[in-house]
Amino acid sequence: MSRGAVALILIALAAGLGLGLYIGWVAAPVKYVDTAPNSLQRAFKDDYILMIATAYAGDGDLAAARAHLATLGFTDSAAAVTAAAQRLSAAGLPAADQQRLSALAQALGAPPLPSPTPPAPSETPDTVTVTPASS
């Protein structure tokens, strides 16, 4: 293959890539409209469950919380909230949010969740004293 043919192939590939990106991102991008919450990934479902628990903590409307949880497609809402609470707790969820999830899970009929464990004490001291070296 000659140098000109290789250059022509590279130019054609770059032009095709550029045209494909333009069409995909600018001219005709994918538009998600009225996407159902049950199509969310698990991590986003967990965030959605936390938002439902926060709303429930604010208004105490269990019927609304059940309706929102039903849109996620779970057959057992209490188990779903408990599982989300365990995953989020393992990820370092603040204690206040863990309490909200626990309250919602209990309202849905789940057994009480274990209370959040406080962080382990630090091995290093909180203050450091610096003394100047004598010369």
Image: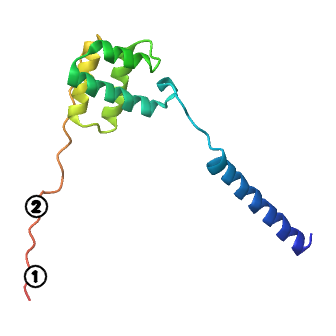
Q: CA distance from mark 1 to mark 2?
A: 19 Å
Between 135 and 23, the residue placed more toward the observer is 23
Q: Position of residue 86 (x, y in %)?
A: 33, 28
**Is residue 110 visible in the rendered structure shown here?**
no
Q: Residue at x 32, y 18 (%)?
A: 65
Task: Assess disc 1: are there few (<14), some (14-19) or many (≥20) residues with their C-alpha within 10 Å of its C-alpha.
Answer: few
| Sequence-wise first label, 1 or 2 | 2
For residue 8, which quarter of the picture?
bottom right
Q: Residue at x 69, y 49 (%)?
A: 23
Answer above or below: position of 42 versus 121: above
Three-letter code, disc 1:
Ala
Circle 1 sits on which residue?
133
Circle 2 sits on which residue?
127
Between 12 and 134, the residue placed more toward the observer is 12
For residue 43, which quarter of the picture?
top left
Q: Is residue 98 left or right of residue 29?
A: left
Which quadrant: the C terminus? bottom left
Q: How is the image coloured?
A: rainbow
Q: Is residue 20 left or right of residue 121?
A: right
Q: Secondary structure at mark 2?
A: loop
Disc 1 vs disc 2: which is toward the camera? 2
